[in-house]
Image (cartoon, grey):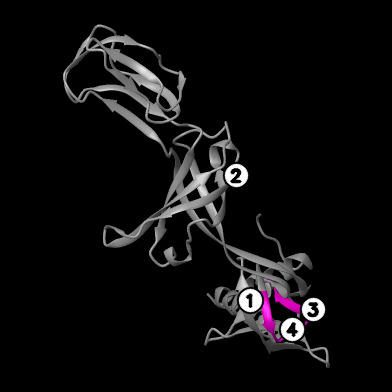
């Protein structure tokens, strides 16, 4: 028993020494240890609104029989390109059924000599040269949309191919779903043969933009308990100190500094801190080992 008690006190002594060592390590190590230096720069920052939607045709015509009739002849087949006022088919009564839009024949529902009831579908036309994207817009963002404004549209299925677009219409009445309100906006697309109806699209529109301003990496920005921004820097005595700054817009990576810093000024970015940083330093100095 005496031997076991002795070993117990030895273990406790070792643990106490480790704890004292850790305390001394944190107190005695330089205050500026664990910082990386970065410099402010002069640059431009642009932020964007982003909306999701799908490609659709602006013009479609679904031709219906306005009365009971019998089709005597059909002048088109699926896949044909027709123009407005082209004759699509004729009836036994000598009536001509014409296209109301330019487009492609996507579906034929009848055959020659077949009788047709009133209201029956005869033919579908779609104009694939005049496409648009319809997007949902949060009620708080709709004020930023203006008809005629230029946007950039990215098509995911085409390796994020970008094409130009123009806002052509913004709804004036919200849709309410599950207690949330949203508006819709239509974006006309420039012609591109690779873009197909139904493809998913992301619409980006410039929100805020500044040029030639002092910028800083977002990682260097710190916030106090009152959410006021500040940065670390090295003062005239070479010690780590803090400096309050004022900020403008940011794009998630870079922030505009409106007051507190000049171009090419060096600030400090805190690296790993606390026990993680200490253990990493001990490991790097050969003071221990760890599993990766």
Query: For this view, does 275 lie left or right of residue 284?
Result: left
The picture places residue 12, in percent across and down from the top left corner, at 59, 79
Residue placed furthest toward the bottom: 237
Percent coordinates x, y for residue 135 in the rendering: 43, 51
Query: Residue lying farthest top?
Result: 113
For disc 4, the marked residue is 261
The mark closer to the camera, 2 or 3, is 2
Q: Which mark is residue 274?
A: 1
Residue 177: quadrant of the picture: bottom left
Q: Residue at x 48, y 54 (%)?
A: 51
Q: CA distance from mark 3 to mark 1?
A: 32 Å
CA–CA distance in space, label 2 to label 3: 36 Å
Residue placed most toward the observer, 153 or 242 = 153
Residue 269 colored magenta? yes
Q: Image point 79% across, 90% down: which residue?
A: 235
Q: Is residue 229 left or right of residue 92?
A: right
Kindly state the secondary structure of the residue where label 2 is placed. Answer: strand
Residue that badge 3 annotates: 263
**Crowdedness near tag 2: few (<14), some (14–19) or many (≥20) residues, C-alpha within 10 Å:** some
Residue depicted at 57% across the width and 85% down the height: 228
Q: CA distance from mark 4 to mark 2?
A: 39 Å
The one of 246 and 242 positioned closer to us in this rendering: 246
Q: Which residue is mark 2?
A: 163
Residue range corresponding to the magenta coloring = 256-274
Query: From the viewer's perspective, is residue 56 above or below residue 181?
Result: above
């Amino acid at each position: 028993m005496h031997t076991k008690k002795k070993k117990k006190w030895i273990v406790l002594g070792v643990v106490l020494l480790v704890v004292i060592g850790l305390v001394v390590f944190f107190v005695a190590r330089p205050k500026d240890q664990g910082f990386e230096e970065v410099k402010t720069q002069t640059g431009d920052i642009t932020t964007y609104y982003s909306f999701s939607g799908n490609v659709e045709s602006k013009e479609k015509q679904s031709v219906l029989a306005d009365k009971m009739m019998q089709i005597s002849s059909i002048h088109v087949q699926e896949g044909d390109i027709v123009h407005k006022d082209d004759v699509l088919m004729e009836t036994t009564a000598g009536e001509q059924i014409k296209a109301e839009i330019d487009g492609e024949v996507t579906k034929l529902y009848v055959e020659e000599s077949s009788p047709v009831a009133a209201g029956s579908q005869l033919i579908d036309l779609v104009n694939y040269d005049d496409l648009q994207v319809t997007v949902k817009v949060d009620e708080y963002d709709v004020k930023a949309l203006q008809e005629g404004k230029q946007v950039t549209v990215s098509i995911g299925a085409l390796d994020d191919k970008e094409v130009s677009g123009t806002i052509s219409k913004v709804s004036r009445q919200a849709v309410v779903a599950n207690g949330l309100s949203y508006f819709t906006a239509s974006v006309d697309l420039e012609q591109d043969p690779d873009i197909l109806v139904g493809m998913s699209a992301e619409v980006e529109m410039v929100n805020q933009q500044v040029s030639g301003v002092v910028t800083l990496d977002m990682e260097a920005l710190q916030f106090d308990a009152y959410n006021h921004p500040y940065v670390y820097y090295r003062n005239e005595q070479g010690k780590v100190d803090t400096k309050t700054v004022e900020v403008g817009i940011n794009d998630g990576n870079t922030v505009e500094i409106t007051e507190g810093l000049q171009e090419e000024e060096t600030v400090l970015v805190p690296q790993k801190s606390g026990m993680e940083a200490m253990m990493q330093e001990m490991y790097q100095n050969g003071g221990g080992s760890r599993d990766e």
